[in-house]
Image (tube, rainbow, N blue to C red):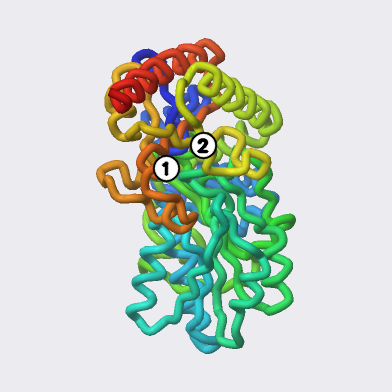
């Protein structure tokens, strides 16, 4: 890619060239309605089902357990609202964490206004939920537990497998927002023990505006929208065939290259961290335990540096986030850092730098030079 060095892959990813090649015929030539009975329609229906298999294969699910959505936010909304509305006879208690993405927290706040009781689980200083806290929070009227697989801001991976074992004992539905983890680490639904899992296409080199929701066979969800019978009647409306094809191809590539990509992301992040530690003349604090973190995510705080100022000064050369991209217009401490009990000065100096499969060593080395030079100037100005 030309232009500034892009190190904000957790915010969004570029569309992979192979994904573009796969989807283009469905923009130009194969424009038929998948519900049509003639050949043009049947061809597109077959393309959708192929993509469903590709998505299912990435997470170890059955194709019939996958429905396509407009993205991670819709998937989270459908999983949470659909599950609790379909199981109101069991109760109105939901368990979640204090570090979830707004696509989860805002849904829970909405449900709270509808009479649901929400337990907001605390996290440790690295943003990790304690499975013991989950078990303590379960009540006879608990209907759903929703805990993200990996945090978008600091990269911390939650103990989903351990929580899944607890959930299974109590017979409570379990959802995980896996938007940040799918394609970066293992996300097999059987191993995780989840009933519902959300996927966002633009986090794994597919376009924005496409996602998927895994619904374990036998789980009932109430519809959010109503119409014809597409997507098993759960997500009616004429399918977005080009984007569905794109997501399928992106998932196929992610599965084929998971190990290679994982190692590359880790190596680029480590090279970045080592370089910044060597060249920045200030204290660098890690906001996550890198042994339990997404391989591409580096959330760090530069002492005596304002993160927004730093990001702004280097934005024509290097792109990254001051905190979460979802809070880019706010100077307030993000809810994630607040939940981690990060002090205000540390939070103000926190940046999130995230590498991707296209990140090169040369880009990392150049980014280290640019960031460290600017950090050192800001620190010197602060001292003066």
Say above or below: 49 vs 349: below
Say above or below: 107 vs 257: below
What is the total number of numbered labels drawn onto the structure image?
2
Tell me which residue sits at (48%, 36%) in the image.
300
**Residue 224 in the figure: left or right of residue 122:** left
**Residue 378 in the figure: left or right of residue 221:** left
**Residue 222 in the figure: left or right of residue 174:** left
Sequence-wise first label, 2 or 1: 2
Visible in this render: residue 39?
no
Disc 2 to disc 1: CB gap under 8 Å: yes
Where residue 187 appears, as percent x and y from the top left, is: 65, 48
Residue at the disc numbered 2:
285
Q: Which element is circle 1 on?
A: helix
Q: CA distance from mark 2 to mark 1?
A: 8 Å
Say above or below: 342 vs 19: below
Specify the quadrant of the image occupied by residue 5: top left
Tell me which residue sits at (56%, 26%) in the image.
273
Q: Which element is circle 2 on?
A: strand
Could you say which is closer to the camera, residue 47 or residue 23? 23
Could you say which is closer to the camera, residue 137 or residue 252? 137
**Residue 248 in the figure: left or right of residue 306:** right
Which label is found at residue 346? 1
Where residue 18 appears, as percent x and y from the top left, is: 52, 24
Tell me which residue sits at (49%, 38%) in the image.
299
Where residue 43 appears, as percent x and y from the top left, is: 51, 41
In the rendered view of the protein, which quadrant contains the N terminus?
top left
Where residue 103 appears, as percent x and y from the top left, is: 40, 57
In the rendered view of the protein, which quadrant contains the C terminus?
top left
Residue furthest toward the front?
A: 384
Visible in this render: residue 114?
yes
Tell me which residue sits at (56%, 86%) in the image.
141
Neighbour tally class for label 2: few under 14, some 14-19, many 20 plus, Cα within 10 Å: some
């Amino acid at each position: 890619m030309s232009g500034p060095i892009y190190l904000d892959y957790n915010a969004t990813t570029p569309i992979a060239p192979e994904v573009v090649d796969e989807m283009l015929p469905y923009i130009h030539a194969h424009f038929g309605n998948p519900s049509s009975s003639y050949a043009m329609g049947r061809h597109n229906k077959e393309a959708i089902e192929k993509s469903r298999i590709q998505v299912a294969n990435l997470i170890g699910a059955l194709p019939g357990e996958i429905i396509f959505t407009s993205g991670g936010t819709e998937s989270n909304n459908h999983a949470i609202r659909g599950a609790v509305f379909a199981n109101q006879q069991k109760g109105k208690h939901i368990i979640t964490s204090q570090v979830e993405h707004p696509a989860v927290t805002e849904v829970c706040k909405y449900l709270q206004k509808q009479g649901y009781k929400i337990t907001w689980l605390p996290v440790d200083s690295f943003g990790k939920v304690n499975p013991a806290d989950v078990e303590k929070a379960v009540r006879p009227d608990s209907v759903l537990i929703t805990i993200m697989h990996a945090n978008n801001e600091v990269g911390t991976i939650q103990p989903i497998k351990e929580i899944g074992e607890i959930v299974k004992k109590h017979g409570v539905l379990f959802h995980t927002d896996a938007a940040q983890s799918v394609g970066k680490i293992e996300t097999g639904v059987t191993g995780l023990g989840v009933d519902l899992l959300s996927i966002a296409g633009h986090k794994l080199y597919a376009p924005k505006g496409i996602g998927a929701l895994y619904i374990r066979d036998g789980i009932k969800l109430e519809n959010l929208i109503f119409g014809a019978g597409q997507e098993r009647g759960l997500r009616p409306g004429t399918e977005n065939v080009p984007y569905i094809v794109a997501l399928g191809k992106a998932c196929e590539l992610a599965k084929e290259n998971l190990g290679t990509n994982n190692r590359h992301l880790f190596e680029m992040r480590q090279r970045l961290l080592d370089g910044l530690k060597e060249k920045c003349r200030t204290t660098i604090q890690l906001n996550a335990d890198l042994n339990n973190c997404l391989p591409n995510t580096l959330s760090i705080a530069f002492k005596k540096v304002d993160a927004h100022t730093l990001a702004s000064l280097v934005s024509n050369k290097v792109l990254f986030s001051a905190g979460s991209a979802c809070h880019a217009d706010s100077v307030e401490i993000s809810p994630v850092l607040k939940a981690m009990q990060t002090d205000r000065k540390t939070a103000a100096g926190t940046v999130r730098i995230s590498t991707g499969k296209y990140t090169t060593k040369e880009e990392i080395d150049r980014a280290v030079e640019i960031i460290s030079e600017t950090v050192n100037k800001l620190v010197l100005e602060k001292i003066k």
